[in-house]
Image (spheres, helix red, strand yellow):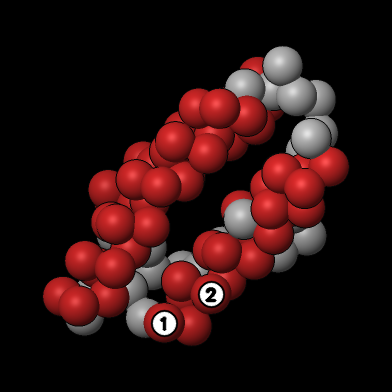
Amino acid sequence: MNQLNFIDYNISLPDKIPSNILEQLGKLEHYNNEGDSVCYYDRWDDLIILAKNAMVAGVLSKKDWETIEKRFWYGAEMALYME
């Protein structure tokens, strides 16, 4: 299991996030804390689909998605190259 921290807690979450996306973010935090990189990456894939649908529906802004991406993906992406 990977003990790297994928999440940048210095980046605040946006104020308005749809509940289904918040649920996925909670799963990402859980898998990050457990050091389970495989499940983290699987849930990230699910999150991308949810976010795209939310942006099309107009309930998630591109800016808010970019903030979520910075908080939850950039560290994971760096770790992916280090594994």
Q: Are marks 2 and 1 in contact (CB under 8 Å)?
A: yes
Q: Position of residue 20 (x, y in %)?
A: 27, 48
| Viewer-closest of 5 and 26 | 5
- Residue drawn at 38 percent across, 57 percent down: 48
- Crowding at dot 2, Cα within 10 Å, few <14 / some 14-19 / many 20+, comes out as few
- Residue drawn at 63 percent across, 29 percent down: 37
Q: Quadrant of residue 36?
A: top right
Q: Which residue is mark 1?
A: 62
Q: Which residue is mark 2?
A: 66
Q: Amino acid at mark 2?
A: Glu
**Residue 18 shows in the view:** yes
Q: Amino acid at mark 1?
A: Lys
Q: CA distance from mark 2 to mark 1?
A: 6 Å
**Does 78 sit above or below residue 51?**
above
- Residue drawn at 57 percent across, 71 percent down: 67
Q: Position of residue 4 (x, y in %)?
A: 81, 34
Q: Position of residue 39 (x, y in %)?
A: 50, 27
Relative to residue 3, is residue 23 drawn left or right? left
Q: Position of residue 31 (x, y in %)?
A: 57, 27
Q: Secondary structure at mark 2?
A: helix
**Residue 7 shows in the view:** no
Relative to residue 61, is residue 78 drawn left or right? right
Task: Give the position of the N terminus as an image quadrant.
Answer: top right
Q: Quadrant of residue 73?
A: bottom right
**Does 52 sit above or below residue 62?**
above
- Crowding at dot 1, Cα within 10 Å, few <14 / some 14-19 / many 20+, comes out as some
- Residue drawn at 47 percent across, 75 percent down: 64
| Viewer-closest of 51 and 38 | 38
